[in-house]
Amino acid sequence: MDTWRDIKETLSGELAGWGRDCCVSGMFLTRLPFPGVKGSGKKDRLAKASRAFPLVGVVIGGIAGAALLIAAGLGLHPLACVFIALGASALATGALHEDGLADVADGFGGGGSKTAKLKIMHDSTVGTYGVLAVIFSVGIRAAVLGGLPGPGMAAAALVAAAALSRGLLPAAMHFLEPARKSGLAAKAGTPDQEAWVKGLALGALMAFLFLGPWGGLLALASGVAAASLVAWVALRQIGGITGDVLGAQQQMAETAVLIAAAAAL
């Protein structure tokens, strides 16, 4: 009996911990009404909760996928359905990652020095590089999703891409130093090995569940390659990561995962 009670208490505590981490991650990654968590503003709290990033990604991808299926049920053109889905995703996140991609494109494209690049990235004004980056990102994702054989597969790809792309972020936060002493990346803290491994494993699991073995493997390889490329460029440009760089990684990884899904399905 004591053993059974211990198991129940352990499971209850573990589930409660995952629930808190989902709420902390959801408040950071989305505009959705996740319940507040005591101590969520403490330093490193987000880093510890980052293992739940892929689960929040499932919620975001689920919202986008549901919007796509509803639009398809109304008989709309596939591209219209896809744009509605991507719009729903952006509304759910407050276009957080798209903003990061735009800032990175403007900073890396327009700044001559690390200081100048960081200054441009911190500026709320969006320049030509940023506008083009978001246009290409949305356009490529829309074209890929619109070409998938059926709205069901497109919805599944959206969930897989949303989860895996966010599951890659804790690893970047673990291995790369913040480019600024202040700012989002510095305040978020550094996930420990357990957090980033669980985050990556969860993201990969979602990709395999929604895309199948071959699709999941191709998506994982493509997502890792895209996120690593952004990380490498960021190291060369500004010597580390910022919140904007994480957003750019998510967008690039999501695009790469969708392309991989289209190649596999």
Image (cartoon, rainbow, N blue to C red):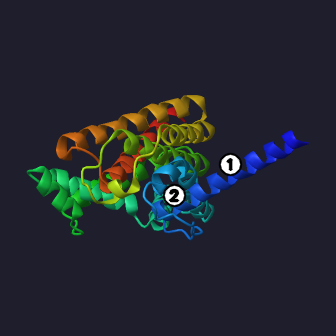
Secondary element at tag 1: helix
Q: Do the residues labelled 2 and 1 touch (CB within 8 Å)?
A: no
Q: Quadrant of the C terminus?
A: top right
Residue 54 seen in the current view: yes
- At horizontal 19% and vertical 47% (from top left) the residue drawn is 238
What residue is shown at x 87% (from left), y 42% (from top)?
2
In the drawing, does residue 90 fall left or right of residue 208?
Answer: left
- State the residue in front, 146 or 57: 57
Q: Looking at the rendering, in which quadrant would you find the N terminus? A: top right
* Residue 213, label in figure: none
Inter-mark Cα distance, 2 to 1: 16 Å
Q: Is residue 229 left or right of residue 1?
A: left
Quadrant for residue 244, please give it.
bottom left
Circle 1: residue type: Glu
Residue 169's x, y, as percent?
42, 46
Q: Which of 73 and 48 lies nearest the eye of the viewer?
A: 48
Report whether 230 appears left or right of 69. Answer: left
Secondary structure, mark 2, is helix
Q: Give the residue pinned by disc 2.
A: 25
The residue under the point 54% across, 68% down is 32
Image side of residue 253 versus residue 196, left or right: left
- Disc with the residue nearer the chain's start (2 vs 1): 1
Residue 19 percent coordinates (x, y): 64, 57
Are there few (<14), some (14-19), or many (20+) residues within 10 Å of tag 2?
Answer: many
Q: Can residue 140 be seen in this view?
A: no
Count numbered badges in the picture: 2
Instruction: Name the residue carrying label 1.
Output: 14
